[in-house]
Amino acid sequence: MNYSPLNPPKTTVKRGRQFLQVPGPTNIPDRVLNAMHRPAMDVYKGFTPAKEEAIHLARQIFQTEQQVAIYASSGHGAWEAALVNVLNPGEKVLIPVAGNFSKNWGVMARAHNIEVEEVEGDWRKPVDPAAVEERLRADTNHEIKAVAMVQVDTATGIWSDVEAVRKAIDAANHPALFLVDVIACLATTDFQVDNWGVDVGVAGSQKGLMGPPGLGLCSVSEKAIDKAMTVDTPRHYFSWKRAFADRSKFRFSGTAPEHAIWGTIEGMRMVLEEGLDQVFARHHRLAEAVRRCVAHWAEGGALEFVGVDPDFRSNAVTSVLVPENFDPDLLLKTADLRYDTVIAQGLGKFEGRTFRIGHMGELNPPMILGALAGIEMAMQTVGLAHKPGGVQAAMDYIAKT
Amino acid sequence: MNYSPLNPPKTTVKRGRQFLQVPGPTNIPDRVLNAMHRPAMDVYKGFTPAKEEAIHLARQIFQTEQQVAIYASSGHGAWEAALVNVLNPGEKVLIPVAGNFSKNWGVMARAHNIEVEEVEGDWRKPVDPAAVEERLRADTNHEIKAVAMVQVDTATGIWSDVEAVRKAIDAANHPALFLVDVIACLATTDFQVDNWGVDVGVAGSQKGLMGPPGLGLCSVSEKAIDKAMTVDTPRHYFSWKRAFADRSKFRFSGTAPEHAIWGTIEGMRMVLEEGLDQVFARHHRLAEAVRRCVAHWAEGGALEFVGVDPDFRSNAVTSVLVPENFDPDLLLKTADLRYDTVIAQGLGKFEGRTFRIGHMGELNPPMILGALAGIEMAMQTVGLAHKPGGVQAAMDYIAKT
Amino acid sequence: MNYSPLNPPKTTVKRGRQFLQVPGPTNIPDRVLNAMHRPAMDVYKGFTPAKEEAIHLARQIFQTEQQVAIYASSGHGAWEAALVNVLNPGEKVLIPVAGNFSKNWGVMARAHNIEVEEVEGDWRKPVDPAAVEERLRADTNHEIKAVAMVQVDTATGIWSDVEAVRKAIDAANHPALFLVDVIACLATTDFQVDNWGVDVGVAGSQKGLMGPPGLGLCSVSEKAIDKAMTVDTPRHYFSWKRAFADRSKFRFSGTAPEHAIWGTIEGMRMVLEEGLDQVFARHHRLAEAVRRCVAHWAEGGALEFVGVDPDFRSNAVTSVLVPENFDPDLLLKTADLRYDTVIAQGLGKFEGRTFRIGHMGELNPPMILGALAGIEMAMQTVGLAHKPGGVQAAMDYIAKT
Amino acid sequence: MNYSPLNPPKTTVKRGRQFLQVPGPTNIPDRVLNAMHRPAMDVYKGFTPAKEEAIHLARQIFQTEQQVAIYASSGHGAWEAALVNVLNPGEKVLIPVAGNFSKNWGVMARAHNIEVEEVEGDWRKPVDPAAVEERLRADTNHEIKAVAMVQVDTATGIWSDVEAVRKAIDAANHPALFLVDVIACLATTDFQVDNWGVDVGVAGSQKGLMGPPGLGLCSVSEKAIDKAMTVDTPRHYFSWKRAFADRSKFRFSGTAPEHAIWGTIEGMRMVLEEGLDQVFARHHRLAEAVRRCVAHWAEGGALEFVGVDPDFRSNAVTSVLVPENFDPDLLLKTADLRYDTVIAQGLGKFEGRTFRIGHMGELNPPMILGALAGIEMAMQTVGLAHKPGGVQAAMDYIAKT
């Protein structure tokens, strides 16, 4: 066969639904789109109930009774809020590095004159709680003011154990604030803000919450607000001192992003109607189907999971290493143009070395199997070595569970 | 495994998109839904351009330069229009029977005091043009005023050769009007009104046209309008005498169904943007993938295509016979509840004996493969005998074409 | 000023919402449009709950516990259903004529070989119950099988007293079935099917029910179904013998018009949430505001209400006579092109003699006042004689009530 | 009459469209909402054309050939971007104060350690270019690094002359950068970035652009980018150094807010289809109608325009002073609850002293007249002294123009 993405067939009109399997933005449910299809509203009196509902729902999903801040921003904006509100210039944040986004946190913190110390890590392994504990134990005069980690790194697909890091902090008897990026995995993977003593959880609307991109959310502990009231780091748009001036009533900076909030409210309602446990179980089942499929493809030896430890492959995204001489972009383009399936490119260290399959949010078996079929056919089309039958392996797993 | 549709798991909240693979209504594209999301309009002056565009587009899809009538009605309503406008009470229509809907035409015609003569046929085979020709040759005094056939019977999934029947009429040198039901297959299968001398083509909005259900369309030849002007059959809502009082300007009976028309216009635009040839080729490819899958499943002998002749299995819908002691409803419910895939039950003679997979309209490879995966897993779940690997067979076919 | 619709300003781009004040289709609420913005569904099992809800809601709005039939059709289709199911060819229907649509019922009935006798009436006055009673008393051998009237004639804006006609039938002790067209006024004006002994009520989706055009609805009494089982009038699409074969379960003819039904369900929910009494009161208040405005305009003598008796001007539509030498089309075009307000032309006898202001459905004070302002400015622009200040008169009335 | 907002009638169900006449967010056109009603998209390759179109359209509306930055943020976020990218800590910005938002710019700048010097002004008058010139002439060693002004202050409804301030800067021969907040008036009022030498223009999506709230936009001159490359102010999310690393290709910080961008693209397309000149002319006409109405109401002496100089009352919003003993909230609530018209409260110095009527974006005559009618009736209901007939005055003006 002589198909090539560089020489596509004459008809380029696409038909049917695109299978969007990137790790965000994700498939937006019709209910969410409908919730956004409405006129704007007076932000002063009219919109207040929606703001309150959004916060109420976000609290349940963060599993917290503390505060929630919401921004018209990307997840990066919510990160910035987390950093600039609890760390003074010159104060130190400890970042256990295990992928692209923990590196990025450091870059952003330094831009705000926050001192960054990284706990070196392997991008193919999760955060090592023992290394965190060791470093904190050594910090006897508590120069470290915060520990900042990523629960699931979108680039690697690896899940790190937040609860274990919390225990490491406690074991070191260290007072550092605990900041956790759950952008890639909130509402796909258990995350217990209050039980695990998380001071700031950082999330976005466009992944497990099934909303449109454009909203950043932070869970904010009382301890974090206390610190925010004293911090000198220059800030205004993202300032909690301003937003929580009345501690229990979050205030937007400027006009609230009404449509993004209405959409995300609807997504959060859907998460809670299904029930967090069921949401996590569904994500596990579909993610495991993807892993069975990838493991089958990989049997010949050409492909590899980025995450070397099977126990830490996340339920949100799967990252797959390709042979060195293969350009994954060829696979991506073919899957998209020829098989209507959109997967993601590699990021950071893995740029040009991986492809990534997102599996979060509004998903069910035929959606994930259709996408896996699209990928497997694309592999066949471009000649990427793999053992055929991955979709069948995924089907067998799903049918049995 | 002890899963049963009668004993479903506790979580009954469904997530993700339903894979709707029934032979109508079909997957409605977002463009179509958006086209319907607008305020109503004055029907006198405001709506006229939309009416004209709808007729203009329908003409191209029917491949005719003659007239088109549009109704707020189901396809059944358009059938009724076809019959009551060209046949007087007591006049005879010849119906070659090859499935459920050709039987139904007879019932409807008789309800209007039209005489019906059936050409007996086998529900597992297409219409036999030779039998039609033979009967017409015998009708030397032209008592038969019309021949009425179905291009694809939705119940059997069998395609009949409209062009060959036209040739049979011509060979018999018979003046009968030629009426063809293409409800199940317009815009999936070639249908050439003018080239094939079709006097009335009957279609609905909700199949290959990708619109919402609620619109019936008829192509109407000049000869059919001529007859309509003289016919005495009582009618008003569906009357062409009234609707084509000004021959070239179709007039609605009452308020036009604006939203259904806007939606169907958008669907027809999409069909024509893709190009009729490409639309037919895409349907053939996806239908053939379904047939490869079903043929694979059927290798063990438990399943069978309804259509015994492979050359006449349609590109719109595939109908599959199950073993006598198996209730296909169990498969349907399991596919739906457990695998989010909706297929159709048997109709007429095949009620309780078949399941049907629709494959028309807004479809691409991962959509059809996801659905086939849902069906294959459901077979596994309910223990319906089949050879596993049908999805793989479909993938192999698609990847090669 | 030299503005003319024939010489419009250079910018023809329209901005802002069109004020649609025709007597149907009406302003569709966003909730209704959102309810229609969803994928199609399997009609066999999936759609049944929606069908049942539609019937349940329609029963409450018709104020009946009897049956309801729903069609993919315009209101004209529902009329046809009313006639062909309860009258045999040759049977007589008595039609008190008071406008355009009672005339039309006669035309349609005759098309189905039903005998029509009209009670002559004045298009500027309501139906005269005494005349109906007199005629029925004279029909001692009960040749008249049905009385068919219109509650509000869309062309004249005049309301007739359905309850009084019921009493006239009773006073004559006549067994005729009672058919009532409420297309223009259901859910704007009280209509009590069971209390008033209405055998068939005929309505459409696109007026007071606030749905899209494309759905016809009939309330059907047990007596009407009994008759339908025996009637010989040729029919199929609209047949109640078929639709109510199982008396308590209405069956569609072909694929149900899902989107029109979802939309109309939402409109009916809104009517019932507001409460029928409140809906009628709101329509009365806004209609009275329109009447105050028109009465003010008319003070100079150039304009006149079509309805001569103030007690019978309807709450659904107001019809206004213009001077003989004035072409109302000039007013309509100017109101539309220059003031974004769409009103309706005259119909039937009043074509070219009236303009009509619809005031039904999704309406509130600023909507109706904005439209009245548009009309008053258009009068000024085209030089149609009127006393300025009509909008102020309407405002004064609304502010006081 | 004993109506009171504290004692509303029993039916609280609202019907009909809300007339939203606040100075943002504004009436969102259906086209914009439809443009947002679509699935998310891959941000890497898929979304790039939309980003480029958004920038291309924004350039035309800003009347610039230089750069544009777009944020998931409110207008406040775009302000912050304007400040932190062109001013170092300790550098001075000169702010001519003429209302609430010029005060707020100062607060925000100080939060980022930027030195602020205000040119004192009167909240009831526009910025005085002469005072700016005088101050800049005195700044012989160019300590002032930027001049930051507001074109229309949303709180006062007063328009200041940006071109005149540019001329003042030039007359003083001062190199300060020129920052202008046009959030409240872009696409309602002429604003010529390149011709007037504006270095940063700051806008939001939810006003004249008719998009949803949630997008901040900045026009950015080459000179401003040059400065941004050298500035030390801590920043990351809003950083132009990062965003314009490749000078001609703006890069988002994190996932682009796709739906807000699609919506705002559609709004900008509509602005440009209408044509900027026509857009300004339409806003002038409707704003002047509002002013005629308010001037009429004010004849008795109880009400007053905030802006004392008629030449500087803006085309975006009109702010009206009420008598000292009157609580404008009573008017707002009554207009909303009883007359479905939403106007805005006073801000800053005018909190509790004014009400504001927004008149920007998707507006036409009946929309604004319906709202004015709602306000006039509310005045009557709550007994706020006014000369009746304001709506008539507005109608007379519109009909004549």
Image (tube, coloured by chain):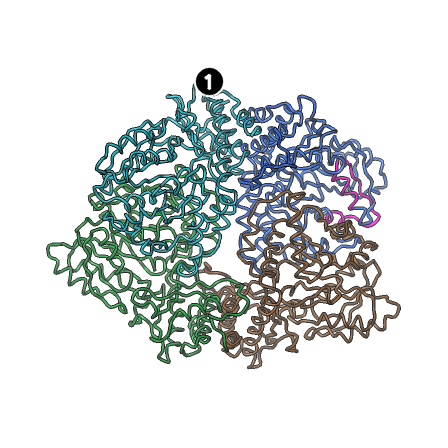
Chain colours: A cyan, B blue, C brown, D green
Q: Position of residue A51 (x, y in %)?
A: 42, 54
Question: Residue at (26%, 31%) from the top-left corner?
Answer: A135
Three-letter amino acid code at the position of disc 1: Gly
B300 left or right of B373 in image = right
Q: Position of residue A22 (x, y in %)?
A: 44, 35
Q: Where is residue B191 in the image (x, y as percent from the top left)?
A: 66, 38
Q: Magenta includes B95?
A: yes
Question: Residue at (86%, 66%) from the top-left corner?
Answer: C143
In the foreground, A8 or B297 = B297
SS for callout 1:
helix
C159 left or right of B134 in image = left
Magenta segment range? B80-108
Question: Residue at (78%, 73%) from the top-left corner?
Answer: C168
Relative to A231, residue D366 above or below: below
Q: Name the residue under label 1.
A: A300
State the image quarter where residue A245 is shown: bottom left
In the foreground, B319 or A280 = A280
In the foreground, A295 or A179 = A179
Q: Magenta includes C301?
A: no
> Looking at the rendering, in which quadrant would you find the N terminus of chain C?
bottom left
